[in-house]
Amino acid sequence: MLTPRLPEDSLLPFCGLGGPCPEVIPIIIPQSVKDWSAESSLRSRGARNNVRRTFPPSNLIARNATLRHAACSASIALALAVVAFAGAPITRANENRGTGPAANPLAAAKKVIIDTDPGTDDALAILLALNSPELDVRALTVVPGNVTAQQGLENALKLASLTNRCDIPVAGGAQHPLFQKLITAELWHGANGLANVELPASKCKADPRFGPDLIIQMIHDSPHEITLVPVGPLTNIALALLKDPSIVPLVKEVVIMGGSISGGNVNAAAEANIYNDPEAAEIVFHAGWRLTMVGLDVGDKTLYDQAHLDQLSKTHGPENDFAVKVLTFLIGQEAKYGAGGGSPMYDPLAVGTAIDPTIVSKQAMHVDVESRGEFTRGETVANRRNAVERNVLHGDRYVIEGLDHVEPNVQVCTGVNADKFLQLLNSRLAGK
Ligand code: BDR
Ligand code: CA
């Protein structure tokens, strides 16, 4: 029998629900996955294409479940088992929403749940969201990424407290990515994840619910109204999907910060949020819901520079002043490690896109998440033509006989009105 070619890290334990995480636990990989994985390592591109075209393009979920996600089957099975084991009760969403701006939201305000790994730019994104009347922030759920789950929860609570929004549920979620060890980014975000700025202790308390359960509950409570805005690794969103796939048609939209169609920041290929949990990303990208990808390459066009900082520094308020410190740190980081023209506003741009979708331009593409490539694990591979060659075996070779359509699954942001967005950001933070 051939050896399955799953990434080595995929044998690491998933301990997404807290508690001790044993160094090694036996994971039984279903035979179907072993067969597929072994077989796929032998297949030519043409042969793969031939298998792919046997599925009707419109049947995205079925096709993905059978082919593109075959390597994820072990992940899914295990994650389901772990989620089921957790048995975290789903309780009613917190209805105590009396004190903040969202107490009287505009009728048209978009209900959003921000799933975040705060994180400097996450913090700015949260401040932007909470100061934007277009959005009704229903919850912050915390995922590990830039910092540990514990640090992230502490940071999210401090941000809710800073903005006097203890009415918003802030819930912890997964403790680790689905199938690999957590990679934290204090190098980029400071030792505490918030640019080493020490915010006062939080007056807000953590919601006891498990983040993915809270997401599920809120979606069912407001069918077709919730926009998910994940700005960290997609672990929590994938867990919510795995536990309750019925949320897919009930979600209004998913606007993620993550991925790239032209190179990465972790390495040549992968963007950090996808790289930090590719299996989760694969599940989220192929769920069949309306997904907008605000990627690294478009975020790189939103450089917050010294002139923007000087402008924001003229006004004051607890949030304004905190933002100035964070942005000063980020501009300094960019000068130290990057090109120095200012700091990209990755996560705030995802929130900005939820606020005003006209800030970005988009193109529908079929996007897959690479999870097995030696140099490309975590890459978002975008098919700009939404077509693949149909290769048919003729004797000892394949012959290209035509093109098969592949259904777009992602609205990929390809351009941004950076000036408009950066002015929006500054205007929403000024004086707060
Ligand atoms: C993403 O990675 C994190 O470091 C940022 O918060 C952002 O979400 C950018 O690649
Ligand atoms: Ca983030």
Image (cartoon, grey):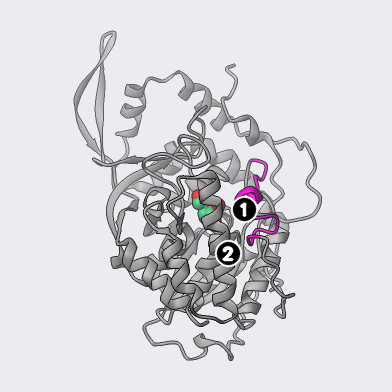
| 44 left or right of 207 in image | left
- Queried whether the magenta region covers residue 187, the answer comes back as yes
Q: Assess mark 1: CB under 8 A from ligand 1?
A: yes
Residue sitting at x 29%, y 8%: 396
Q: Where is residue 228 in the image (x, y as percent from the top left)?
A: 47, 65
Q: Quadrant of the N terminus?
A: top right
Q: Does residue 233 appear in this view?
A: no
Q: Is residue 41 above or below residue 89?
A: above
Residue under numbered circle 1: 146
Few, some or many C-alpha atoms within 10 Å of disc 1 (few <14, some 14-19, many ≥20)? many
Q: Assess mark 2: CB under 8 A from ligand 1?
A: no
Q: Quadrant of residue 386?
A: top left
Q: Does residue 178 appear in this view?
A: yes
| SS assignment for the magenta stretch, majority | loop
Q: How many labels does the image show?
A: 2
Residue sitting at x 48%, y 77%: 314
Distance (Cα) linking label 1 and label 2: 15 Å
Q: Is residue 105 above or below residue 392?
A: below
- Circles 1 and 2: CB distance less than 8 Å? no
| 113 left or right of 176 in image | left
Few, some or many C-alpha atoms within 10 Å of disc 2 (few <14, some 14-19, many ≥20)? many
Residue nearer the viewer, 237 or 79: 237
Q: Position of residue 416 (x, y in %)?
A: 31, 58
Residue sitting at x 39%, y 66%: 422
Residue nearer the viewer, 168 or 243: 168
Q: Is residue 224 above or below residue 379?
A: below
| 326 left or right of 254 in image | right
Q: Position of residue 44 (x, y in %)?
A: 38, 20
Residue sitting at x 40%, y 41%: 368
- Amino acid type, label 1: Asn
Marker disc for residue 326: 2
> From which residue to which does the magenta span run?
180-195
